[in-house]
Structures are given as C-alpha cells and as structure tokens.
Image (cartoon, rainbow, N blue to C red):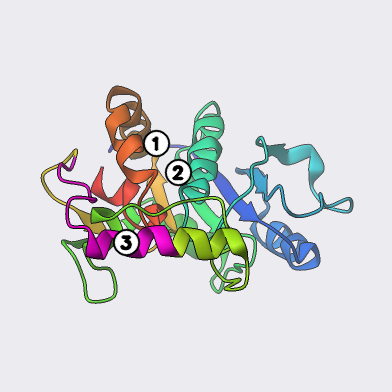
Amino acid sequence: MTLPKHQIKVAYLILAHGNYEHLNRLLLALDDDNVSFFLHIDKKSPMPDNLVLKDKMIFVERINVWWCGWSAQKAINSLLKSALRTNADYFVLLSGADYPIQSRQAFYSKLKKGGEYIDISKGFLPHKPESRIKYYHFDGADRRNKRNLKTLLYFGMERMQYLVKFIRKRRYPFNRTYFGATWWALSRECAEYVTNYIQKHPECITFYKTSWCPDESFFHTI
C-alpha cells in the first residue's frame, strides 16, 4: 500500500444497538477534521434522538441484527460499501460499546505505518471449530432466549444435522479458512479488494449466510 502524504483520513464504521449516552462519548473521543462516521442502528432498537456530530454522520439502512447470525455481517458489508464512497484511507469497524484507550495521534501514527489491523488465525480453533461453517445455522432468532419457540425450533433443526449425516455443507467456496475477531482497521486497498471479491464471488455470501458467527470468518477468509 502506498501511504498518503496528507493526514490519514479514517472512516469509522459503527454497529450500535443502545446505550446512546456512551455512543456519544465514543463519537466525541474519535472526532477530528480527518474522520467520518457511518452508523448502523439495530432495527430492533429505538433510533437515538440526541446524538452529537449528526452533520458528520451517515446512517445506513437498518436491519434486525441477530447474535451469531449473517445479519451482523450484512450490516458490516453495508457500512463498508457506504464508506468506500468517501476518500478515507482507512476503515475502522467498531461496536457502539467500544472506547479508545490511546490518543488519536498514537492511532494515526500506527496507521501511517501501513498494513492491515485484523486478528487472523489459519484453520479451525478449539473455540472456533469447523462445525461453525460445516453445518447449517439459521439467522433471525434470539439465540440467547432459550424459551423462544423460534429459537428452540432453530436449535432442533441444527442438532438434527449431527444425527443425519447427509445434512451438511460438503463444498466450501475456498481452499483455506481463517478466523479472528470481528473488529478491524483495513486500508482502502484491502477494503476495495474485499468488496470486489464479494461482488465476483456471490457463492461466498450464500455459504456464509448459514454459518455460525460469519463476522468472525467472512472477511478473514477473503
């Protein structure tokens, strides 16, 4: 990547679903003349009516985001696609519950060194096994609510795959798999590569739509 001669421009992509007082603190802590903000507010949550820096924000279309489902990755894709229309040099994915522990200048100094800041591990891990992508997992239910009938139905359908051997994914749209944390800071060159790859390989979306926590593998594997 060729480093910009000007001050690094950063687009912050933020997934938020509540605690808007803290979100305001986050926005103010990150704000300066070189940043822009792109927000996705979970459709299940009320829209905030007292956010600061509204003149610097772009809200992407709201969807219902469900824990461990494709919907989280769909919101991320939407944020990045929107942010790529700016002249940002780096794109930083955050949760609305995050908060910086170093100065903005320290962060810019790190970004000026170039490269990608994303946690990646090759292959499967004890806490991120192949079953996450090998078996079908379904989006659209609150997996933390074990009393919800839709959740119980999904759990039952997913467990059936362990008993019926032919119900599973047999072909992967890639040769190697990578996992890592959801959150990252990617250069424009990398972000454009990822989005172009997604457009050329829709089979990757088809595959990951029924995976567990795709946001911890989708970008990483690409």
Which region shows up in magenta?
156-172
Name which residue lies at 29% across and 23% down: 200
* Disc 1 and disc 2 in contact, CB within 8 angstroms: yes
The correct choice, above or below, for 88 with respect to 71 in the image is: above
The disc labelled 3 sits on which kind of residue? Met
| Residue 141 position within the rendered picture, expressed as x and y whole percent measured from the top left | 57, 56
What is the quadrant of residue 189 in the picture?
top left
SS category of the residue bearing label 1: helix
Q: Is tag 3's residue or tag 1's residue first in the polypeptide sequence?
A: 3
Q: Is tag 3's residue or tag 2's residue first in the polypeptide sequence?
A: 2
The correct choice, above or below, for 199 with respect to 30 in the image is: above
Q: Is tag 1's residue or tag 2's residue first in the polypeptide sequence?
A: 2
Gap between marks 1 and 2 measured at Cα: 6 Å
Name which residue lies at 24% across and 64% down: 162
Numbered circles on residues, count = 3
The disc labelled 1 sits on which kind of residue? Arg
Name which residue lies at 29% across and 36% down: 204
What is the quadrant of residue 86 in the picture?
top right
| Residue 214 position within the rendered picture, expressed as x and y whole percent measured from the top left | 38, 52
Residue at the far left: name it: 175
User: How crowded is the residue under tag 2: few (<14 C-alpha within 10 Å), some, or many (20+)?
Assistant: many
Name which residue lies at 22% across and 56% down: 178
- Quadrant holding the C terminus: top left
Foreground: disc 3 or disc 1: 3
The disc labelled 2 sits on which kind of residue? Tyr
Q: Is residue 106 visible?
A: yes
The residue wearing badge 2 is 90
The residue wearing badge 1 is 188
